[in-house]
Amino acid sequence: MDKKNIKPSTRFLNEVEPVISDKEWIKRIPTPETYPLYEMYRGLETKNGWRYDITVIPPKMLGNEFVKTKGNRNSENFLEIYIVLKGEAIFLLQKMENGKIADIYAVKAKPGDYVLDPAGYYIISINPSSSETLELGNWVPEKNINAYEEIEKNHGAGYFYTQEGWIKNENYQEIPELKFKEPERSMPENLNFLN
């Protein structure tokens, strides 16, 4: 799947600003609306109602925090599967119930690893490298609509990944202990189970 023929959409700092921990750093960026964070190549392939995308996240620091995607939850309890194509990734997954964090865990993954985004979870992709670009592929239902409201309302997920390690987001009243899970090492034979 060649992304050369697809024009990417760029996610700029002003779009991700609500979920970044270091607000003082943001103030030092004169034009956040032109400060690029990552690129998304959507619709590189479609198959049986599924769409394949690639996200490219260069190594950057958002102040004290490692660069990350904004974080979203899929609509209609749709599942999604991610594969690390290049670099190393940390995925942070968080489920909300009644305005509180019901579950939160992180998955560290390297090239060839797969991570399932379960129904109802927000997922944030983090590039923890100071030198290497992260490339992620993902299969998602074409009908999916991304939701951001609870992540934006609480100014990010329950934890931020920073140069000092994981720090809690104090905008939440209660934050469960962060768990860690292993990625999948092989791609499912078909995507039917995701429906």
Image (cartoon, grey):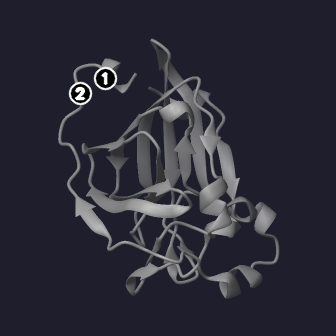
Depicted 54 relative to depicted 148: above or below: above
Badge 1: few (under 14), some or many (20 or more) residues near its Cα, within 10 Å? few
Q: Nearer the viewer, residue 170 or 49?
A: 170
Which residue lies under the disc numbered 1? 193
Residue 168 % position (x, y): 46, 80
Left/right placement of residue 189 relative to residue 157 reads left
> Which residue occupies the extreme front position in the image?
98
Residue type at mark 2 is Pro
Q: Are marks 1 and 2 in contact (CB under 8 Å)?
A: yes
Tell me the element at label 2. loop
Left/right placement of residue 183 relative to residue 64 reads left
Residue type at mark 1 is Phe
Depicted 2 relative to depicted 88: above or below: above
Tell me where residue 41 sits by quadrant: top right
| For marks 1 and 2 on the same chain, the one whose residue lies earlier in the sequence | 2
Residue 21 % position (x, y): 59, 78
Tell me where residue 5 sits by quadrant: top right
